[in-house]
Image: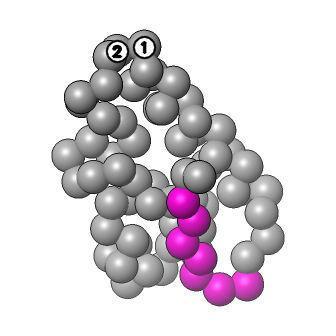
C-alpha cells in the first residue's frame, strides 16, 4: 500500500509502510494555483510515483517525496 498524505506522521501512526508526501492538506496531490493542465500533470506524476513505490521493497515505514 502507498498512502499519499500531507501528514506523514499520521500515516505512520496508522501503519502505512510506503508514505508519499503530498503537497498540502486541502490539495494533497495538486496545487490550486497552477493552471488546469499543469495541475493535471502534477496529479499524473503523483500517480506514477505511487505505482512505482508499490514495486519498491521496504523493510520499515518509509516516507518518500515526489522529487
Which residue in the structure is indicated by mark 2?
A: 36
Which residue is at a point 73% across and 76% down the rendered structure image?
Answer: 58
Q: In screen coordinates, is 9 left or right of 50?
A: left
User: Which span is picked out in magenta?
Assistant: 59-65
Snapshot quadrant of residue 38: top left
Q: Which label belongs to residue 29? A: none
Please tell me whether residue 36 is drawn above or below residue 21 in the rendered image.
above
Is residue 11 found inside the magenta-colored segment of the image? Answer: no
Tell which residue pokes out farthest to the left in this image. Answer: 26
Q: CA separation, marks 1 and 2?
A: 4 Å
Judge the density around disc 1: few (<14), some (14-19), many (≥20) Cα neighbours within 10 Å. Answer: few
Q: Which label belongs to residue 37? A: 1
Residue 56 rendering spot, x and y as whole percentages? 77, 63
Please tell me whether residue 37 is drawn above or below residue 6 in the rendered image.
above
Which of 38 and 52 lies nearest the eye of the viewer? 38
Please tell me whether residue 40 is drawn above or below residue 63 in the rendered image.
above
Answer whether residue 49 is visible to the viewer in this image: yes
Residue 44 rendering spot, x and y as whole percentages? 55, 29
Q: Secondary structure at mark 1?
A: helix
Amino acid at each position: 500500500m502507498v498512502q499519499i498524505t500531507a501528514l506523514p506522521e499520521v500515516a505512520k501512526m496508522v501503519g502505512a509502510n510506503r508514505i508519499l508526501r503530498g503537497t498540502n492538506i486541502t490539495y494533497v496531490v495538486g496545487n490550486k494555483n497552477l493552471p488546469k493542465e499543469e495541475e493535471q500533470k502534477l496529479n499524473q506524476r503523483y500517480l506514477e510515483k505511487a505505482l512505482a513505490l508499490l514495486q519498491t521493497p521496504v523493510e520499515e515505514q518509509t516516507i518518500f517525496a515526489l522529487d
